[in-house]
Amino acid sequence: MNAGSIESLSYADWQKIAADTLRAVDPRLFVDGEFRASPEGGVIETVNPTTGAVMLEVTAASPADVDRAVQAARRAFRAGTWSKLAPRERMAVMYRWADLIEANAASLSVLETLDMGKPIRDVIAGDLPSVAGFIRFCAECIDKIDGRVTSTDPAALHMILREPLGVVGAISPWNYPMLMATWKIAPALAAGNSVVLKPAEQAPLSCLRLGQLFVEAGGPPGVLNVLNGIGEVAGRALALHPGVDKISFTGSTQVGKLMLVYSGQSNMKKVALECGGKSPQIFLEDLPDMDRAVEAAFRGIFGNQGEVCNAGSRLLVARSIHDEFVERFSARAALAFTPGDPLDPATSMGPLVDRESQRRVLSMIQTGVSEGARLAMGGDAPAALPEGAYVNPTLFTGVSSSMSIAREEIFGPVASVIAFDTVEEAIEIANDTIYGLAASVWTRDLSTAIHCVRAIEAGVVWVNTFDEGDMTQPFGGFKQSGNAKDNCIDSVRSYMQEKSAWIRL
Ligand code: NAD
């Protein structure tokens, strides 16, 4: 069954697929081409955030398990079963891997929904095709990245070779479990590295299956290992491991900073960080289409329950259009985003990833109220869905840049409207943050648009749209949103190192 044919499945179909998939899942560690228990025997309960029910006990890796996985990855790298495979053969495995992911689209999608509450329709339309598409993109890059011969003394030949790094440790978050992991493991594998992936403990099931499918596609054992585990235990052990050459991390800014410490405390491994955000959307008085702008505003913060690194959580609205903007936003967003069971294809908004997230987001909403912001919609949990970790889509008005809700990453469906009078004031507010992941500006005026694109401190600035792009686009932040770029051909290069060979002729 592929991504196309699963679009017609009903709620009842998905409930059955969910039950069948959970029965078949192997929740152990995937190391050296097979599932293994941890000799130390740790487990983590995986809870369905929609129902609160414990679905499975997933093996939790100990530091010794991490060491075994890194050793397996190093053995495979030195053996050359992947690192020295001819480019076209490596490409063929990655293409088969993408095909198998599509062939298993239903079970992979349902794991995502059960583990972290994402609406099934979003996984089918977005995450799953993006995962397969990005693996194919990275495969295509494999024989497009060349070394160089430099212009030097004719009595010598100077070549610059590009080689894989060795063993890459990838640590990923739970908000797009498969996709965020794929943004790391696909370019790292395309470059010829071995990988140890530690997905987020809240949602590891789809990633374990990705590892298994890689081997089914012909990937040699030990090249891609997947270890579920607690961040402070397994993630820390991986980032501190002297046998890891690069750690590629996506997650919070707070934990991202620890990666730099771990690198310094161990082997100076390279560190690539994709971290948090507090992205502004600037709506100027001359925006081209109010309805489209309002839609981008509510989709940009309520999509994926607001659990998006580049969520447009700060809506900077020109005072002259403020009231109309807020009125249209409140009227339309509540209809477009009604919380429900994410396994139902009609549902556009699921629960947050867990109860802890729900508590944290509701407490941030209380902070907003106590600091003087006004609730224009939402602000609570839906009374009809008490078992799940739900939060209603929420909009604050009367927000100032100094309030906690305008400064901290909430990582939930909470938008803050900040009014402004001039373009320069809007730019100043947009840049008044430790983050710099993404931004947008809405205007008819080309000069104003270009001025804003240049002045805003963010890795991507959209004009008259939000959150568009594809795999050719480098994605990553300025400031404390990170120090690296995912996607694009350069992401494959970032998992390689240059070696200089000077040959006296
Ligand atoms: P998190 O930082 O809590 O966890 C991310 C990963 O780090 C998990 O696998 C976790 O187990 C691990 N981890 C936690 N503590 C660790 C430690 N001490 N040592 C090693 N590993 C540790 O983040 P999260 O809650 O999973 O994800 C949400 C965050 O991710 C948000 O801040 C969001 O903005 C960010 N994010 C960024 C991007 C991007 O591309 N910039 C994309 C998605 C998510």
Image (tube, helix red, strand yellow):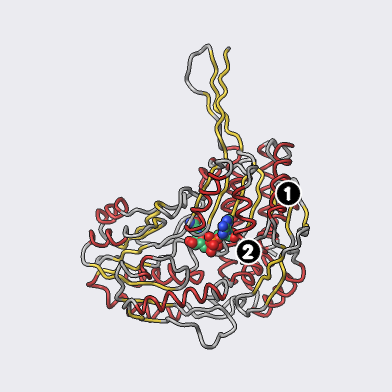
Q: In this view of the protein, can residue 179 be seen by the observer?
A: no
Residue behind mark 1: 68
Residue type (three-letter) at the residue carrying disc 2: Glu
Residue 72 drawn at (x, y percent): 73, 45
Sequence order check, earlier mark of 2 and 1: 1
Residue 494 drawn at (x, y percent): 53, 42
Residue 188 higher or lower than 252, as above or below: above
Looking at the image, the residue that sits furthest to the front is 265
Residue behind mark 2: 201
Real-space Cα separation, disc 2 to disc 1, in angstroms: 19 Å
State the quadrant of the N terminus: bottom right
Query: Horizontal placement of 440 versus 118: left or right?
Result: left
How many marks the image carries: the answer is: 2
Residue 142 higher or lower than 397, as above or below: above
Q: Which mark is residue 458?
A: none
- The quadrant where residue 15 appears: bottom right
Residue 203 drawn at (x, y percent): 62, 65
Identify the residue at horizontal 51%, vertical 13% (top origin): 154
Badge 2 crowding class, 10 Å Cα cut-off, few under 14, some 14 to 19, many 20 or more, is many
Residue 201 drawn at (x, y percent): 63, 64
Q: Look at the numbered disc 1 and give the secondary structure of its residue.
A: helix
Identify the residue at horizontal 21%, vertical 67% (top origin): 421
Residue type (three-letter) at the residue carrying disc 1: Arg
Q: Which residue occupies the foreground of this view, 394 or 154?
A: 394
Identify the residue at horizontal 52%, vertical 58% (top origin): 251
State the quadrant of the C terminus: top right
Distance from mark 2 CB to nearest ligand 1 atom below 8 Å: yes
Q: Quadrant of ligand 1?
A: bottom right
Q: Look at the numbered disc 2 and give the secondary structure of its residue.
A: loop
Distance from mark 1 CB to nearest ligand 1 atom below 8 Å: no
- The quadrant where residue 378 appears: bottom left
Residue 112 higher or lower than 86, as above or below: below
